[in-house]
Amino acid sequence: MSTEALSPRHSPWAISSRTIVFGAVGAALYAVLGLFSFLIPGTQSVAVRPAFALVPFFGKRFGVITGFFVGLVGNLIIDLIQGSGLLWWNWSVANGLVGATAALIFTVIPPIANETVRYLVTAVAALAATAIGLLFVITDIWLQEVDFSTFLFVNYLPALLANGIAVVILVPALDAAWEPLAKRAGL
């Protein structure tokens, strides 16, 4: 199995037809699948959106631009379909930053030969990218006029918990499923 996310011939910052196609496909998948979420039992309105795992996955596999595009455009489409319009645009930017951050984190991780360790590192790195990217929602303090406590305990931490569950489980699974497909397709 491959030990690298981006092959040496692809820069994480490259803009090519590959970047555009995978960005469009990823954003469309995230937009459609992102409409399906479920509440965590015993919590108050903390929903898990499993499709969020596509954001760091596309960042890891296809670079900064693709990861940012998938998160930003996919989340904007979800918000538009659900009727919130562009009111929460900063959350879409935060989703995009998760994808871009994932690409940057996975670029600096050296190749790992052990499959179990590689999946564990993938889960931890995707969670770190999620935690860092979602920090952008601190802009709710100015945009929505909430205090820091509300930002932290009502907005950021529940989103990190819900999305963290999705990425820790699904990004390594998506990555494991992608590797044989990428080999066959020559990607």
Image (cartoon, rainbow, N blue to C red):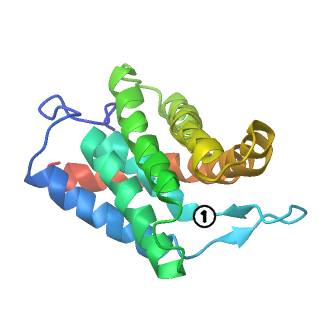
Label 1, residues with CA under 10 Å away: few <14, some 14-19, many ≥20: many
Q: Is 91 drawn above or below residue 31 in the view shown?
A: above
Of 81 and 34, nearer the camera is: 81
Can you say whether 36 is above or below 137 in the image? Answer: below
Question: Depth check: 118 or 158 in front?
Answer: 158
> Is residue 47 depicted above or below 99 in this figure?
below
Can residue 63 be seen here? The reply is no
Work out whether residue 136 can be spotted: yes
111 up-or-down from 160: above or below: above
What amino acid type should be assigned to the residue bearing mark 1?
A: Arg
Image quadrant occupied by the N terminus: top left
Q: Is residue 115 left or right of residue 100?
A: right
In this picture, residue 163 sits left or right of residue 40: left
Name of the residue lying farthest toward the right: 42
Rendering coords of residue 158 (x, y %): 74, 50
Q: Residue at x 52, y 32 (%)?
A: 125
> What residue sits 63% from the left and 53% below the top?
144
Dividing the picture into quadrants, the one containing residue 184 is bottom left
Q: Viewed as shown, does residue 106 lie left or right of 46?
A: left
Residue 77: name its quadrant: bottom left
Disc 1: which residue: 49
Q: Going by the picture, which residue comes out furthest to the left? A: 17
Please provide percent x and percent y for residue 2: 31, 36
SS label for mark 1: loop
Q: Position of residue 51 (x, y in %)?
A: 51, 63
Residue 70 spot, x, y in % from top left: 35, 56
Q: Quarter-wise, where is residue 8 in the image?
A: top left
Task: Identify which residue is drawn at 52% across, 53% down.
Answer: 91
